[in-house]
Amino acid sequence: MEVVTQQAAAASSLAELSDPDLPPNWVPLLTSDDSVYFYNVKSRASRWQVPKKAPEPQHIRASHILIKHRDVKNPVSKGQGRKEQPIERSFEEALKALEEIRSEIGNDAVKFAELAKSQSDCNSWERGGDLGKFVRHKMHKEFSDAAFELDVNEISGVIASPSGLHIILRTE
């Protein structure tokens, strides 16, 4: 009975520490003697003290590759060699194209910029997809939420917004 009580107490301590204010990727865990420690599932770092959330930056810098489809807010390409061409592709065709681009990029920022120049429907293609610095509320919510969640030099999966489908590379 004593073991069950100890396990219940440890689980209760763990539940109290499973605070939504923990930084992303940090989880509380128990040692074999029921001491609580914190583990980052992404970086594999661990510590005894509760990790603090870093303040969100006021602005970030990111690049993107935009693939539009016919159902977006402005279905006209601004990409290299396609300026002002109406977009005819479906959402599904755009998604397939962007998934193939994402697969080709891997984690290569140079490849990202090359493909932004040749494939993006955004006029940022001229700068390798670079959007410059921006604050959270300047972009569509879906885009901003994804961009601000990325670590510097991390590349997102496919993100949908009213402008189309994006792959985002956070650069600062």
Image (cartoon, grey):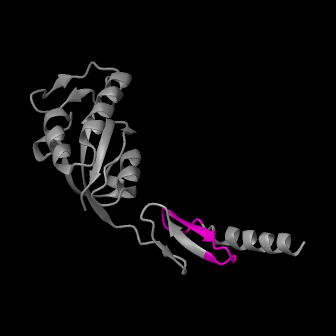
Q: Is the magenta stretch mostly helix, strand or loop?
A: loop
Q: Which of 43 and 167 is in front in this view?
A: 43
Which sits in the foreground, 69 or 95?
95
Q: What stretch is highlighted in magenta?
A: 20-36
Magenta-drawn stretch contains 61: no
Relative to 81, 61 lies left or right: right
Q: Which residue lies furthest to the front in this view?
A: 32
| Residue at position x 27%, y 57% in the image | 153
Q: How many marks?
A: 0
Q: Position of residue 78 (x, y in %)?
A: 16, 33
Q: For this rendering, which residue is in front, 141 or 1?
A: 1
Q: Does residue 26 belong to the magenta stretch? A: yes
Q: Residue furthest top?
A: 88
Corner quadrant of residue 17: bottom right
Above or below — where is 76 with respect to 103? Answer: above
Q: In which quarter of the image is residue 32?
A: bottom right
Q: Position of residue 58 (x, y in %)?
A: 33, 66
Residue occupying the point 30% across, 42% down: 167
Where, quadrant-wise, is the N terminus in this rendering? bottom right
Q: Residue 164: x, y in percent?
A: 33, 34
Q: Is residue 150 left or right of residue 34?
A: left
Residue 98 location, quadrant: top left
Residue drawn 29% across and 38% down?
A: 102
Q: In this view, does 77 lie to the left or right of 135?
A: left
- Report the residue that reaches farthest toward the bottom: 49
Instruction: Residue 128 in the image: state x and y as whole percent.
Output: 14, 45
Q: Which residue is drawn at 20% across and 37% down?
A: 122
In the rendered view of the protein, which quadrant contains the C terminus? bottom left
- Location of residue 15 with respect to 82 vertically, above or below: below
